[in-house]
């Protein structure tokens, strides 16, 4: 097994560039040998490629059949809808694994699901999951908000202004493009305000939707069937 985080990143990047089933088995087996490591099957029922529920489910089961021996837990993802997490819980039970909290936090909102543990450190926590197959997941009230509303608020979190961060106040200061000279520069160096009219229109809509007075209406309008609501 590789001994440094940098070496592991190189190995994983090389696999991503040229994936093979044999190499994936080698990498998972090597990670499994590190007793302080956790290998988690993240948001297994997010059909990101849009192949359809039936095909996606078959692919999930095939992955578990092929590589499940090296997977320590299944993720309960705080930014995925409740039906997906229900399916993840069922998958974990069938595979003899526990679920563990996760969330893909890309904005400033704290995760909506947490793992509770008396472990004194990550290695001890990993032992609880791997050896004891015990996981105590706490779902926070925020998870009961409509999934689409939370995504809309995450978009606002991404594009709103941050006066406390000079040089990165506007969203265009934080998004980069490649210039004609090949350098990566912020959009604000090429755009005035929000840029082209179509982008400006979208940004204006986002700002309206972020208004506190609009939120109660959005909470009802963006509710979808099967969500966990208070």
Image (spheres, rainbow, N blue to C red):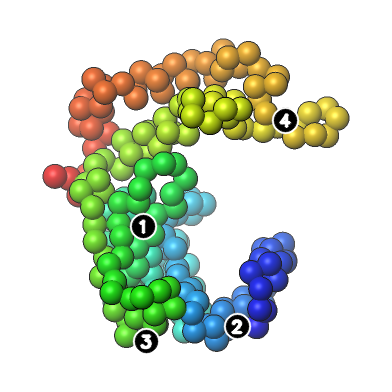
Q: Which residue is mark 4?
A: 185
In the rendered view, does 13 fall on the left or right side of 114? right
Q: Earlier in the sequence, mark 1 or mark 3?
A: 1
- In the rendered image of this protein, does residue 156 appear above or below residue 135? above
Q: Residue at x 43, y 49 (%)?
A: 105
- Count residues near mark 2 (Cα–Cα under 10 Å), then give few for <14, some for 14-19, many for 20+: few
Disc marking residue 30:
2
In the rendered image, which residue does mark 1 sit on?
Answer: 77
How many residues crowd mark 3 within 10 Å: few (<14), some (14–19), many (20+)? few
Image location of residue 159, percent across then percent down: 49, 29
Instruction: Say if residue 183 shows up in the picture.
Output: yes
Whole-percent x and y of residue 65?
46, 80
Disc 2 and disc 1 in contact, CB within 8 angstroms: no
Farthest left residue in view: 230
Residue at coordinates 50% horizontally, 77% vertically from top-left? 37
First in sequence, mark 2 or 1: give its number: 2
Q: Which residue is mark 3?
A: 131
Quarter occupied by the N terminus? bottom right
Gap in Å between the C-alphas at discs 1 and 3?
A: 22 Å
User: Disc 3 on helix, strand or loop?
Assistant: helix
The numbered mark at residue 157 is none
**Quick one: SS at disc 1?**
strand
Q: CA distance from mark 4 to mark 1?
A: 34 Å
Label 4 packing within 10 angstroms: few (<14), some (14-19), many (20+): some
Mark-to-mark CA distance, 3 and 2 = 17 Å
Q: Is residue 94 visible?
A: no
Q: Quadrant of residue 86?
A: bottom left
Relative to 119, does residue 211 appear above or below in the rendering?
Answer: above
Q: Nearer the viewer, mark 4 or mark 1?
A: 4
What is the C-alpha distance between the residues marked 2 and 1?
25 Å
């Amino acid at each position: 097994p590789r001994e440094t985080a940098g070496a592991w990143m190189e190995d994983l990047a090389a696999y991503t560039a040229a994936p093979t089933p044999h190499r994936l088995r080698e990498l998972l087996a090597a990670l499994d040998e590190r007793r302080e490591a956790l290998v988690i099957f993240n948001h297994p029922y997010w059909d990101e490629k849009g192949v359809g529920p039936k095909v996606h489910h078959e692919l999930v089961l095939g992955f578990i059949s092929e590589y499940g021996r090296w997977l320590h837990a299944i993720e309960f993802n705080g930014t995925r809808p409740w039906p997906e997490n229900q399916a993840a819980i069922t998958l974990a039970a069938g595979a003899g694994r526990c679920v563990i909290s996760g969330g893909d936090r890309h904005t400033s909102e704290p995760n909506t699901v947490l793992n509770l543990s008396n472990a004194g450190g990550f290695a001890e926590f990993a032992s609880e999951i791997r050896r004891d197959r015990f996981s105590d997941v706490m779902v926070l009230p925020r998870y009961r908000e409509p999934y689409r509303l939370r995504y809309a608020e995450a978009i606002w979190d991404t594009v709103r202004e941050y006066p406390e961060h000079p040089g990165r106040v506007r969203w265009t200061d934080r998004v980069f493009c490649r210039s004609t000279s090949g350098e990566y520069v912020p959009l604000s160096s090429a755009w005035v305000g929000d840029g082209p009219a179509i982008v400006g229109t979208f940004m204006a809509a986002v700002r309206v939707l972020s208004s506190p007075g609009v939120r109660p209406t959005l909470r009802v309008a963006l509710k979808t069937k099967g969500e966990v609501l208070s």
